[in-house]
């Protein structure tokens, strides 16, 4: 299977290369990157020297599948002709995630480059859309925050045990902001500090709302999503809060047991959604493709609390993208993704 | 003014020494510490060598005021005889914070060593209890999380613009866990990781609930308080969420302006509660005695959101303790506390 | 191949489990740990839950090979009976590294538990002792600092281009100090700080001196080895300095080229000793089994400078141990060790 | 005393503002910064909002003393006219440090903007040039590495107890690289990693060599200076190595005592050069103006080893600049500089 990576020089693209380099069924045959075109990958990323390829401006080989790690708008624009030629595509940008074109244009402030392709596109969260992913040739790979947030809340919303009145307080490492320069990624500014950002509305909000509303058995969700920047490189931790729905579940300690059982049942066959019995830490997911989920109840206030975490570059980006590729090509879903977390 | 510090060898005690060493009206005359008794302070903390004192087991001099940085129960036990002799006391432990003895015993799992002193004790948050602090000889210095949390929510609760249905999602640096050894303070375990802890109930919850209920104009608060451990040394960041009360405030963008004005007015004369116009970061408070507060509204969901931060060892412990001492001795409230943040 | 891990609960033991869990020829059949005996591995290390084994006090199964991650003295004592039963052993402690019993007793302050086994033991640095490792049943796995240091200097010493007057200034992440508690591993003490330690002599000095003297074509080395503690979890960086020997090599820029060629030639067939063309960073080795080496010359002073780095838990401990196991069992040397660095 | 700060928006300039804001004899009356001209300082640095001034393009007030934190060449160019008007100047750039114009042009690759001012300029290390600083109106404030390195070696070189054959292996936090963007200051690249840089020659080398050769009683030094980048914000640690001169000092343990005594004597009256009795950590200098120095001897190899550390933005830049100002204006040398380290 020939694979192309568009924009290998960002963190998501580089992580795709890391994973695909050891994937037994994939062969990376083309890698692109604007500013680094003409250089060998080993000059830019010494840990990938073994790949021994030159970065080009465009996909130079015919490929069976292409991953794009370009920014939004640029991504769909570059993918569209390849898709029309029959190449399967996994887009790590936001271009194929939102079903509502108006939402896309409102949040991203630009017209969609190829709205006609949206209908075929599938939101690439295998735990919720596995069958559709297997059938499609365009996957909109979820954002890092949405992956953690949606998996944390889907079971409760589907079962209707919570009011759809949700607060997600999320914490992210700095690599989520990419390899571009800014004060938000400047070491001395973010080290030894924590802050909220995107206070007026973060672009991952609409895709979380879209997916949670879709699965909710109580209608559209009323969602506050608040991201925070934390001094670490990788990892996302989502703390999710919602009131239990009166009558839909027991109260007190029994509620805790019922919630845990509900989550265990929901994810029992999932290779990468692990419901755990003790509060997790992002370090448990460093470098692997797991989303680790701990549901419980604040019995003082009758609120569901779910804590979930993942590696933003793996299950939150490149790992999930490969998981989607595996499904699209009828390979074992965890092929090339059986990394054990690098702990500590 | 002669000052004693009980348990100078923990982080709060050490920080008291740092601040008091430069306080123009205070003279440190006695410092204690169990395991380090007999050693010079400079052997234990080279940066305090200038203090040039020997650590003793007990307060060896008569002092005008004593600070205790012992753990709960041990602290009140050690302070009681000194208080009875007429020494003024600022207790950094939890022993003089809770008004309800049953709450104390339930959360701390021990009988209170001197319940008869509770009536005189004042909760040492100057922004809410300044007059009482000036009159008392026993101050229960607030915890680090409560300082950030209560200051973030007091104006809104007093004004009655929110439902008393509150979620506080707090993030703390590791020094809040003290100088004692555990996996929670072990570098390789907490570095590059974030987690929730105290999921079943953290001991700072009852004092936050006590103070917020006291000031609330809508009765007792229904509070979820969830602390998280973050890989940094100092700093606490509290993200507070509560639904706006219908009819009590405008909706939409107007609500944001009204909330900001309300907060500005509430804290307009406060030296250490700074309402700011852009989302803050804990780094803005590194080493100073400020609590920085940013109130806003999530206009999509009509929720109040307040973000506050402080240095857990300064405004969250030793700095606030000195602020309380200043008030108890009729000194300028900011005497010895005019540090500029060490940024970056 | 049945494998036992003694003291799986330390960082080296845990890392052995991470690597061996995916090794196609190895099956972990017994894991031990004193304080955690009776617990499931997943309770202690959630990221290893998949291993699904109970920690025991002793090796409970007959095994083909055993790794010990116990402290010195305890390790040899526990290994000796297994070795006598015919089990092959890779010892991560210092017990089988030093050839000179007096040196061992002087540096480790204890008698050797089984000096009669020393003769069979091989110093497990495959790049220097591959043939012996293939023949032996006892490997003394090198320390983390020695692995980086010896590989950095061996080519120059063998070729005789430097005076044997060497300074190694090494920098290590905190995980090298293990999972035990101390101020040296206490987050708030080591974060945002750097210091020298072991100033009077670090225990890794004699094994570096032993190996460098062995390979030196100019006799015994005169070695200063100075370790520093750096605020990061994994990684060792060794900066090595030695005067070029007059007449043994060109001077000026030519010396740089000759040195690089010499190193390239020396390591040309090595899977895990990579000579690179730009100064490396420890991040290039995060989680992989590489030792990355950058040799150059300070032409102002005619000094050889070699910078080398590795992951202290992989090439500096568990990874190298598995590399040794592969050699002892005639497997491909890199079996189970083809991890790509987790960058960034 | 009216003070101007040129380029307040870099880290050194910002740190000058932090210190001078609390200096009892100084009043900041003019602050400049190119890209931020027109903004209030509080918008750029919220922790300095209290200063309540607008950033301008040029010094707008007549001032008694001006500090420049501009890059080299630009700095002297901007200072020259002010100096000619009689303003005293402390230049934090390299423009007034090197005595040899050819060295300046070789290392900085540009002609010096005002060579005629060099003769008056004094190298602003008070411990070595106090009298000259008191007399001059132009101080070239030393670099951060040179401050730590020169203070570490001056006593030994002056006393002639070492061969002038020196290796300085230095480790720096990231703030030393300034507030400008690059991969070297990008969080995800430098966090959890260490590397050597400037391997072909760092610009701080010539000023270290100049000062060490000047004080050496054995002639010009033969110097290898090798800086490393460490994942922390503030702090420099210099590890210095040089062979003891045969016959100039005892050997063995006696050498250690003699070295310590020599250093104690040399710095006995210095307020900011502290010779300590245990190996220090950079954390002991966080936010204060100390250079902490630990001299000892590697008795195995008869090498002097000196470890020194300081806060690169204080004693390594802004604090030392204020110390120089105090001397130039006949104020107490430690005025405004009595900060206690912010530990932990």
Image (cartoon, coloured by chain):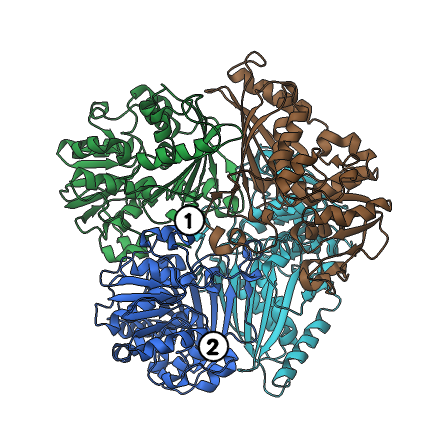
Chain colours: A cyan, B blue, C brown, D green
Q: Where is residue C30 in the image (x, y as percent from the top left)?
A: 80, 56
Return the x and y of residue A294 as percentages of the image width and height.
63, 69
Decide if residue A38 is on the left or right side of residue B149: right
| CB under 8 Å between discs 1 and 2 | no
Q: In this view, does C54 lie to the left or right of A321?
A: right
Q: Which chain contains the residue that carries disc 1?
A: D
**What residue is shown at x 23% (from left), y 55% (from top)?**
D51
Q: Which chain carries label 2?
A: B
| Disc 1 target residue | D283
Q: Nearer the viewer, residue A70 or D164?
A: D164
**Residue situated furthest top in the rendering:** C247
Q: Do labels 1 and 2 share a chain?
A: no
Residue sitting at 13 percent across and 34 percent down? D86
Is residue D247 depicted above or below A225 in this figure? Answer: above
How dense is the environment of label 2, judged by Cα within 10 Å: few (below 14), some, or many (20 and up)?
some
Query: Eyeballing the image, is D265 above or below D103?
Result: below
The residue located at (41%, 58%) in the rendering is B38
Q: In which quarter of the image is the C terminus of chain D?
A: bottom left
Q: Is residue B243 among what the camera can see?
A: no
Q: Quadrant of residue C106?
A: top right
The residue indicated by pointer 2 is B205
- Indicate the position of residue A179 as horizontal and vertical percent values: 51, 46
D10 relative position to A286: left or right: left
Q: Position of residue A122 (x, y in %)?
A: 66, 61
Q: Nearer the viewer, residue C106 or A152?
A: C106
Q: Is C325 placed left or right of D61 in the picture?
A: right
Identify the element where label 1 is drawn: helix
Count the numbered circles shown: 2
Work out whether A333 lies above or below D253: below
- What crowding class fits label 1: few (fewer than 14 Cα within 10 Å), some (14-19), or many (20 or more)? many
Q: Can residue B210 be seen in this view?
A: yes
């Amino acid at each position: 299977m020939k694979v192309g990576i568009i924009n290998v020089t960002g963190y998501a693209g580089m992580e795709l290369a890391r994973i695909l380099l050891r994937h037994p069924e994939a062969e990376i045959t083309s890698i692109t990157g604007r500013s680094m075109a003409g250089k060998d990958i080993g000059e830019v990323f010494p840990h990938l020297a073994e790949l021994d390829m030159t970065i080009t401006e465009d996909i130079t080989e015919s490929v069976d599948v292409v991953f794009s790690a370009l920014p939004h708008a640029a991504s769909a624009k570059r993918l569209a002709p390849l898709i029309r030629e029959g190449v399967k595509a996994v887009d790590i940008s936001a271009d194929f995630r939102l079903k509502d074109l108006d939402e896309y244009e409102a949040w991203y402030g630009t017209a969609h480059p190829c709205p006609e392709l949206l209908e075929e596109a599938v939101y690439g969260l295998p735990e919720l859309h596995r069958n559709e992913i297997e059938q499609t040739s365009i996957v909109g790979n979820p954002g890092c925050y949405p992956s953690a947030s949606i998996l944390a809340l889907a079971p409760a919303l589907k079962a209707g045990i919570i009011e759809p009145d949700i607060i997600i307080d999320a914490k992210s490492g700095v690599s989520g902001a990419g390899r571009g320069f800014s004060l938000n990624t400047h070491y001395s500014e973010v080290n030894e500090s924590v802050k909220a950002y995107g206070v007026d509305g973060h672009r991952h909000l609409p895709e979380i709302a879209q997916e949670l509303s879709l699965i909710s058995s109580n209608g559209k969700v009323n969602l506050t999503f608040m991201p925070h920047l934390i001094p670490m490189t990788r990892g996302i931790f989502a703390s999710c809060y919602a009131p239990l729905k009166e009558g839909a579940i027991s109260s007190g300690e029994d509620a805790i047991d019922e919630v845990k059982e509900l989550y265990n049942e929901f994810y029992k066959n999932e290779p990468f959604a692990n419901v755990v019995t003790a509060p997790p830490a992002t370090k448990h997911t460093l470098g692997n493709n797991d989303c680790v989920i701990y549901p419980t109840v604040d019995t003082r206030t009758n609120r569901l609390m779910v804590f979930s975490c993942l590696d933003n570059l793996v299950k939150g980006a490149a790992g999930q993208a490969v998981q989607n590729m595996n499904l699209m090509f009828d390979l074992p879903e965890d092929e090339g993704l059986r990394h054990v977390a690098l702990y500590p």
